[in-house]
Image (tube, grey):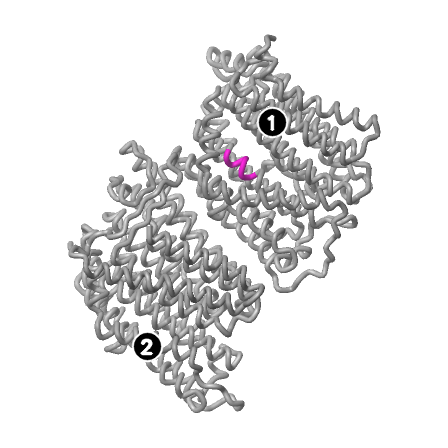
Amino acid sequence: MNELQLSALLPFIVLAMASVVVILLIAFRLSHTVIQVVGFLMMCLVVFATWYVRDTLPQEIPPLFIVDGQAAVFTGLIIFSVLVIGLFSYIYFEEREENPKEYYILLFLATLGAAILTISQHFISLFIGLELLSVSLYALIAYLRNRNNAVEAGMKYLVLAALSSAFLLFGMALIYMETGSMKFSGIAEQLKTVGSTPLFLMGLGTIIVAIGFKLALVPFHLWAADVYQGSPSPVTAFIATISKIGTFAMLLRFAQSIHLQQYPLAVTIFSVIAIASMVTGNILALQQRNLKRLLAYSSIAHFGYLLVAFLPGNDAGTEAAIFYLAAYSITLLSAFGVIILLSSRQHEAEELHTYDGLIWKRPIIATVLAISLLSLAGIPLTAGFLAKFFVLSTGVHQAVWLPLIVLVLSSVIGLYYYLRVINSLFSTTVSAEAIPKPVHPFFHISTYITLVIMAGLICWLGIFPSVTLQGIRTFLMLH
Amino acid sequence: MILIWMICILLAGGIVSWLVARTSPLLAKWIALLAVTVDLLITCWLFSVYQAFPDNTSWYINHQANWIPALGISFHVAMDGFSHVLLLLTFFLGILAVLCSWKEIKEKTGFYFFNLLWTLAGISGVFVAMDMILFYFCWEIMLIPMYFLIILWGDARRRYAGYKFFIFTQVGSLLMLLSILALYFIHGDQTGKYTFDYFSLLHTTMVPGVAKWIMLGFLIAFAIKLPVVPFHNWLPDAHGEAPTAGSLVLAGLLLKTGAYGIIRFVLPLFPESAVDIAPIMILFGVAGIIYGALLAFSQTDLKRLIAYTSVSHMGFVLVGVFSFNNIAMQGVVMQILTHGLSTGALFVMAGMLKERLHTRDIDRMGGMWTSMSGMGGIAILFTMASAGLPALGNFIAEFFVLLGAFVNYPVFSIIATLGLILSAIYSLRMLQKVFMGQQHFTEPVKDISARELVIMAALSISIVALGLFPQPVINTVQHLSTIHPLLHE
């Protein structure tokens, strides 16, 4: 490994160090606040490191990794999300008076796992990244173990994630048996000479099962609602954004390397999964009265939409998918931010009636939530609309009409439940729930400000996407 | 540039009146009124400038700015006579909408005027946007504030009405978005220039089969807004439950965006397909005229009754547009204006009655003439207008449409004429039930107030003026026939 290659890995090394630093800080019995601040600084350092090494990209570190523009964009998105989630975690865990320090170790480890997924070009690094992510998540989900649903959610995720890992390994083994390589480029080369065999396709299928599980696509979505509901809200936000961004980045790289879209069978499978996810997700969300469960089903539908951009397998699709993930993460994080801000020690602000008439009580927070819901619903002037617009436009260009029509019709169904939440925000009967008093004014206010900035960001992305698009394009050139 | 300013005045006025409402609700009302009035004055001033133009077929304001150049999306606004007339209507009804909410809205005044002004901004944006994506943005922006107007200040079943309104329109919008994108890629693949600009897209050649599907996407969106009969389901609920100003804006302006869309986009972009589908659309139009009139006759809820008359009147618009005839097209534009005024007036009247009697049920009204003779007189004027009595604007409009349609579709035209008879029947029934007959209300009711008189007088004068001197309007929209190459076939 030469110097350039090492420097390309710098952001990931810093990210790995973050967990170690947190362990040391805990050993020295430093307070939650110190850990929070140091964690924040470490993440800033990661961003800085990414910025610092951007000129040396792309770098291949054979055989496991490749750090290119695409990886940088996804990593950037992941780090951005973890910055926000880290900030949200402080007030959430301080409210609960349970020792939250080890939480940060797990959080950074899981982030590292997701980041590794974005740069892996080999089955081994892929598996390590995925397991790092999953194993940290088992603990994170059940972190508040005294709460009602936490252990149940943790167990569910553990059993199903282990099962999906088994599927993944089996699929890898089959593909390795057929092609004799674990490196994506090696597999692709081998495929060119021998063509695809039934065993290879079977391997591909089982890998799709594993990925479908991680992305909570129908029919592998059964865990989503329970886990979303049972986890602490910051962890839910983590599962909904970072874990899925990482997995999707991995899927994208794998598909690009082996030209997945050239197999009609694979395209058909992904179309069916996309259609099923859009329809099922939106229909299941219709009658939800629990906001976290509702967001779980809505995210199932959203990843269905995202797959529509994935279907053509061209550059425009990649660009659309990245924009979609960016818009989706910002939107979802601000929605979860509002949930976290409204949660009190005794209960999670997840029941819909908690939000009745919120706009008259706390106009700013309610506006943030309303904007993010409108963005999820894909209403113009918000990032969600342009994201959906780009997905539609790649689909229209490739003439994948069936998924497109399903996308349009199912997002109309989706409107109903987003509108229902907005209705209750604007309802004239104001909920009697008392507003929790901020325990830590500084972090409370910074969370508040972050939320406002994120809402502004949603609108900015929705009105002036040029800069972001240009940025994504420049990064994608680096491969 | 001035068009952007006009939209910005409304947007800014909305935000300011929301902000000041906390300290002084009255000031918020005045700011809202001021913003719309300024826009109306600007439009009137432009009208006088425009009259001086020697060539009145052109787009005499045309402004284009970069927005998202990477995708060929620009901020392109332009105005011709047709847009101008519609803007005039928008701001005129806008002022009346602000005035008629003056007393009705007692809580959350600031947010109310914010939504009202933003709806108006969206509507005026729709009438001037010449970039398909900008158009789509405005199309949606007028929707969301309207939704809030319905669910926050509406009547008992407001939530149901709100959902229905939003979801129906959204189905159409998204299908239209698909069509816009398809058009964009077809045009881009042909010319190598990917753009959403209306004037570029006009010159797209399409395979007839493809063009038909793309046109359907647009047509469904506009047909839901207009509404054409099988898609009219949202209208009675939304109109019935909305607050008075909401109904006024819905009936007077929002429905017109559907008609505008068909005339501006469907016909010029897909001339051949539009000709192919014309007989079917005329059938739908005639069905709408008759069906709307029959349902209007059987309603007991005053606002729903007026809502169904809209369905009937909008049928004439559809018939006129798809008869591809110059006279019919002039009739359509007249119908757009006069229906906005007359139906708007009826909704305002319904609002005034509801404010006094706290009911919309016409069986519980009756004999109101004794206590409210002033309003009764005006009511007669507008029911007669709605029934298409000569000397009032609606007569010219419907007469022109029927005259134009008769050339190609005599049978449909004759059936549509029945609509005029039916409209006389339901109008007279409404008048009879509300103002004549047995008096149900014993407690004294106040007659029309000065503010209300101003609103109704403005409407009355304009509807009579349009009936007697329609020529200025017809002049401004003469050129509509030149942008439709197939119109004279």
Residue A229 at x, y = what percent? Answer: 70, 44
- Quarter of the image for the N terminus of chain A: give it: top right
Question: Label 2 crowding class (10 Å Cα cut-off): few <14, some 14-19, many 20+?
Answer: many
Name the residue carrying label 2. B460
Magenta segment range? A323-328
Chain letter of mark 1 equals: A
Residue B448 at x, y = what percent? Answer: 43, 83
Q: Is residue A324 magenta?
A: yes
Q: Which mark is residue A123?
A: none
Name the residue carrying label 1. A47
Nearest the eye: B171 or A210 = B171
Quarter residue A39 falls in: top right
- Residue A356 placement, left or right of A104: left
Does dot 2 land on a helix, a strand or a loop? helix
- Residue B55 placement, left or right of A316: left
Which three-letter amino acid code belongs to the residue tagged 2?
Ser
Quarter residue B323 falls in: bottom left
Overall secondary structure of the magenta section: helix
Chain letter of mark 2 equals: B
Does dot 1 land on a helix, a strand or a loop? helix
| Residue A113 drawn above or below residue B389 | above
| Residue A466 drawn above or below residue A422 | above
Discs 2, 1 touching: Cβ within 8 Å: no
| Residue B328 drawn above or below residue B452 | above
Residue at the image position 18 percent from the left and 50 percent from the top = B485
